[in-house]
Amino acid sequence: MSALPEHQFDDIEQQYDAAYSGMWIFLSTEVLFFGGVFFAYVIYRSTYYDAFAEGSRELSVFLGGLNTGVLLCSSLFMALAVHAAQRGRNKQLIRYLIITELIGALFLGIKFLEYYKHYKEHLIPGLNFSYPGENASQMQLFMVFYFILTGMHAVHMLVGLGVLSALAILAYRGKFSSHYYNPVDIGGLYWHFVDIVWVFIFPLLYLVKRTGG
Amino acid sequence: MSEHIVPPKTYLSVWAALLVLLGATVGFAYLPLGPIHVVAALTIAFAKAVLIALFFMHVKYKNRLVLVFVCAGLFWLAIMFALSLGDYLTRSWLPRPTVWISVPDSRRGF
């Protein structure tokens, strides 16, 4: 790959900024995609606050918090991967991309474990939901939001894993250098964004009301 | 390329700060704070998002035009929340038109 820009750009830096800004436009649509569900969640949570607090206590803060930490670690390695690309250290780049992917897979594994627990506890709406108490149907609504939000997030993680795999293969074929690493940076933006989404999902779903006070 | 290269040390500090904030978020949830819970949780989440965007996503090192693109999503999200909440939160402010009286309260939503 040469450091020459495509012919519609003045210089390589402009081309780089165009790609970076374009990715943020896509991320803006993602903000609104998740934002719509978050908004619906806010409305129903304030309407059925007690039931949502009850539902939140059915989730494991330990597993959710652990997963948040796991994702933050994966973001660190993604940032380091971009750094390696900027420095033109190809082997390091591939290594960091794979570590990022492994940590991302660990996140999905823990998530799957949580889903399995919900299955055993009969908390999956539409499949086997049964919950004692008068708030059962509102609590079911909470679980619907839980599965939609975490499920959509998990799908984004899968897409992210695909993106990182593609980047790792391209890096293995020697497509990147310290002059050309745009795709790594842009792919990183996506990965970090999915991390940010989880940063909001975690307190909103897992920590609705943990104390009496 | 004149691209700013962030030293790995910065990434490590940001990562450590993020983990501290994660601990704070969980810790606050167990303190008896009452209605401040959700404010604390969202403030911390927002702080984490800003840290990730500024450093991991390099927004801090970009020019202002790029910043416009970055803020566009937040801007539109704010419009959606402001206008929609403007509807939901103000529904009970005015008396219902008499033709609606037959609708039971449970059907009125928020």
Image: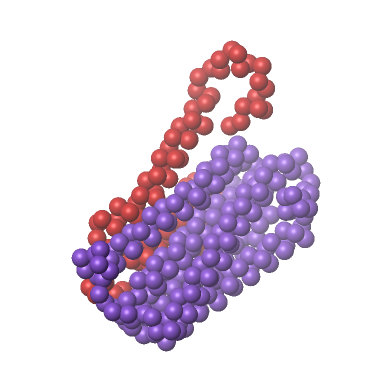
Chain colours: A purple, B red
Q: Answer yes or no: is residue A35 visible.
A: yes
**Residue A195 x, y percent position in the rendering:** 48, 63
Residue at image coords 45%, 84%: A172
Judging depth in this view, the residue of A94 and A203 nearest the camera is A94
Q: Is residue B56 above or below residue B89?
A: below
Judging depth in this view, the residue of A129 and B38 nearest the camera is A129
Which residue reaches farthest top? B98
Which residue reaches farthest front? A7
Q: Quadrant of the N terminus of chain A?
A: bottom left
Which residue reaches farthest bottom? A91
Residue at image coords 53%, 17%: B95
**Residue B13 x, y percent position in the rendering:** 38, 72
Name the image quarter holding residue A89.
bottom left
Residue at image coords 47%, 54%: A30
Q: Answer yes or no: is residue B9 visible.
A: no
Q: Is residue A136 left or right of residue A150?
A: right
Label count reads: 0
Q: Is residue A147 left or right of residue A160?
A: right
Judging depth in this view, the residue of A78 and A137 nearest the camera is A78
Q: Is residue A114 left or right of residue A195?
A: right
**Residue A119 x, y percent position in the rendering:** 75, 59
Name the image quarter holding residue A111.
bottom right
Residue at image coords 38%, 55%: A25
**Residue A76 x, y percent position in the rendering:** 44, 72
